[in-house]
Amino acid sequence: MSILDVYGLKKIYSSRFGGDRVTALRNVTFHVEKGEYVAIMGESGSGKTTLLNILAAFDRPTNGSVILDGNDLSKIRDSAAAAFRRNNLGFVFQEFNLLDTFTLKDNIYLPLVLAGRPHREMKDKLLKIAAKLNISELLEKYPYEVSGGQKQRAAVARAVITDPKLILADEPTGALDSRATDELLTLFKEINAQGQTILMVTHSIKAASAANRVLFIKDGEVFHQIYRGNDGNEQLYEKISDTLTMLATGGEKSEK
Amino acid sequence: MKAGLYPKLALEGILKNKRTYFPYVLTCVGMVAMYYIIGFLRYSYAVANLPGSETVSLILSFGSWVIAFFSLILLFYTNSFLIRCRKKEFGLYNILGMGKASIGKILFFETLIVAVFSLLAGLGIGIALSKLAELGLLNIMHGSVNYAFTLSPKVLKMTALIFGVIFFLLFLSSIWQIRFTGAIALLRSRDMGEKPPKANWIFGVLGALILAVAYFLAVTIRDPLTALALFFAAVLMVIVATYLLFISGSVFFCRILQKNKKYYYKTNHFISVSSMVFRMKRNGAGLASVCILSTMVLVMLSSTSSLYFGSESVIHSRYPRDINMESHMVSTEALSDENIHALYDEILSVVKKHNVTPKNFYHYRSVLIAGLIEGNRVETDVSKLNNFDTDTLSNICQFYFIPLSDYNRIMGTNETLADGEAMIYAFRRAYREDTLCFNDGQSFKIKKQLDKFIKDTDPEALTASITVIVPDLAKSVKELDTLADYNGDKMTEAVWTFEFDTGVQPEQQVQLYKELRETLRTSEMYEKYHMTSLQCESLELERNSFYSLYGGLFYLGITLSIVFVFAAVLIIYYKQISEGYEDQARFDIMKKVGLTRREIKKSINSQLLTVFFLPLVFSACHLLFAFPIIRKLLTLFGLDNVGVFATATVVSFAIFALFYTAVYRITSNAYYHIVSDTK
């Protein structure tokens, strides 16, 4: 069953007075099944971030539609977008985006507090998740007191605590060292194994090779995709690497 | 390195950080200007010509210290924010290889540039506005207006000195902060929350204690002169206590809120409480400053406006009738019926010439003497005063002996007194004894306590008084008449009081008054009627001088209030702006996680409501406790009308609260715009 359907997405940025027009997304169509773990790859400027912003309802497409679990995102009013996000989506950002005024615990509680959940329920959920993410000891600390990997785990905890339909991860390993990267990818795998749908935008081959399917975006279009099938991480890594090389050389040719 | 490098880097640093530097420089300029204006008024000849100028000058000198003190607090507060924002920049310089000494040089030039600019601009504005303030004052006091532009070199020097010191301290504190922070910590310092001050509870308890003592003093003070002496001490104590309480209290308060899970984990409270904890020390200091400034504004407005609007009541209690005359006699014998009647006819003949018939008139004889009172004993003999407790002024009492016949005539009563009996009317003190005994000799049995007399003796007198109605005046004061003071002068004074309304226009009243003075205040008249002096006062004439005094004070009160309100608004504005820029990124993240615009507004309101109205509530509390002491102080100015002062206090508070709410609305809008405008 498909949880996210993206049809013919097009996004054109124009400067305020309608001068320069930049096409960020030309025609993006793809579907994500429930429980899938999808990575989206592409070079800088390929439209990855634009795509993610539209999926997260931060931005609106010029054309096309995004349907999440039967809800058309373009039909959601701006005022309802925030509530929609916190009820349906979980976010993991490259820069963690933890609030330095809160302890890790309160950071993780944030979406539930915004949703007005009772404290008892929040506490129960947190205890389970914190144990799973191995951050139980750190809950009373402030973000500036812990390492990057620990921050990112807290951010993951914040993303999953609402049981979102979809987790959107924007370069989640971008600010992490290799050990913390490995830990995070293992974590994503485990969460995914429990049925959580994850959509990750990355340009790290290592991160992408942890996913079950990899989409490649080039010049605002889905250019190619690779399914893991029965491949292990290393094999998938090779395939992705090859594809990127091909994209890069092919890309050079296509440019006039 | 080139010589001009550091000044250039410093200037660039200021221009690049316009957004944070602008409110800071504005604050500096504002404080310098305000300090100059207050100092200028203090030495202004317009103020020196005010009746009661010593008190005004005292208030103004206190005011200028207050401004200096607040400049220090306020500029430290704003500067710490500035340095906080810039630590990242300095950390980067440091990592790129610039030594701490060089960073210090940049900071030095930055401080110098800001200091020079603020002093020049501030003094310029101050000079311009101080003339305006002086003109306003002269206008109200009906003084001769002099449009010449005057400078006060003394105050200029003083301002430059005070602010020079403040800027130097600011520089030292910045250096200190940069010096002892590592490069990496500098880079990240903006993200760190404030650590709660150690020994927080000690500050809290200390603050509560000091406040309790100050409140106790304010409430228990009995006589106005002690009130004046203790007032400034009490004010200082309240200031210190407010700072201690706000700084420790806000931490304590936030911690309690945070512990209460049910309260804390609600959308509105969650965000507001956590950001209050994040900057609790600054919050405490800022709020305490706002609270103290508000209190000062309220005290000044309520007291000066009650003097102004209570003028009529003061004038009428001081001058009960249109024309008020008091003739002081050579001796008690000169109060004889024949002498008084002759004098009375003499006065009436002058009055008749002006076609005036005295209305509501009354006259009475009295003999007065001052003494120390203890229990039912009164000592008026200066040679025996050592036996009495002279430590407190509250023992001094003025005694007025008035014959029963005069009392019955003017009050329209039919009281009788036997020999050795007396009725008394106590003013500004209670007298509960059954007898009243003078110098262990002459003793009176108190037959009745009177609750009013035609005139509250002298409302301007600070000491208490007791009016003693006796059946036979000459006999009653016979012993007292023999007493002499250190100079050998008689201690008693025999006075005949005659007061009447004229029922004619003010100009005619003044004419009559002048004529009365000319005719009666001559040595022939004095000799003829056995007088030592004759006072004659016209209510109309006095009204003008009262209004110019109280108008002048009221004007000064308003000027000082504007200055203090401006300082408070600056603090509030700066707090909002600086926190807005700090919170911008936070609200951005929260929006991403799913905070709606409505919720942003709601959470901001919840935070601001808590933070904003706390100072107002506290200043209302301070004002309430200051009420008794200020009431006492107002009696020094002749105002003894509680109703007027209470009304003035309530009205001042209402106006101020309205104004405060308006400031809150405007600045919270500014905050909201900064926070919600993310891209």
Image (tube, helix red, strand yellow):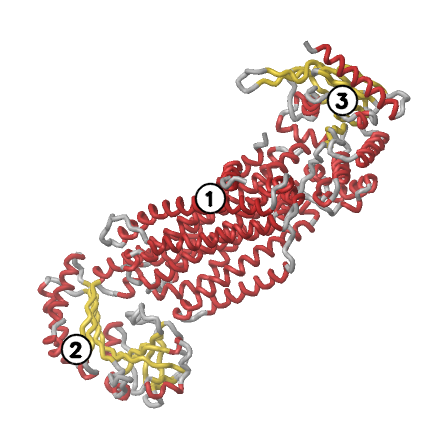
Q: Do labels 3 and 2 share a chain?
A: no
Residue type indicated by callout 3:
Met
Front position among marks 1 and 2: 1
Residues A62 and A221: in front is: A221
Residue type indicated by callout 2:
Met
How packed mark 3 is, by other alpha carbons closer than 10 Å (few <14, some 14-19, many 20 or more), is many
- Tell me: B16 left or right of B551: right
Tell which subunit mark 1 falls on.
B
In this picture, is B471 found above or below A37?
A: below
Q: Judging from the image, what secondary structure is the residue with disc 2 in?
A: strand
From this viewpoint, is residue B665 visible?
no
Percent x, y for residue A164? 76, 31
- Tell me: B129 left or right of B541: right
Mark 2 highlights which residue? B531
Q: Which of marks 1 and 2 is nearer the N terminus?
A: 1
Q: Are marks 3 and 1 on the same chain?
A: no
Q: Judging from the image, what secondary structure is the residue with disc 1 in?
A: helix
Tell which subunit mark 2 falls on.
B
Gap between marks 3 and 1 measured at Cα: 52 Å
Residues A256 and B471: in front is: A256
**Quadrant of res A169:** top right
Query: Of the numbered discs in the image, which one, if any, rests on residue B113?
Result: 1
Which residue is found at the position 16% from the left and 60% from the top?
B510
Gap between marks 3 and 2 measured at Cα: 113 Å
Query: Of the numbered discs in the image, which one, if any, rests on residue A41?
Result: 3
Percent x, y for residue B256? 66, 53
**Quadrant of res B420:** bottom left
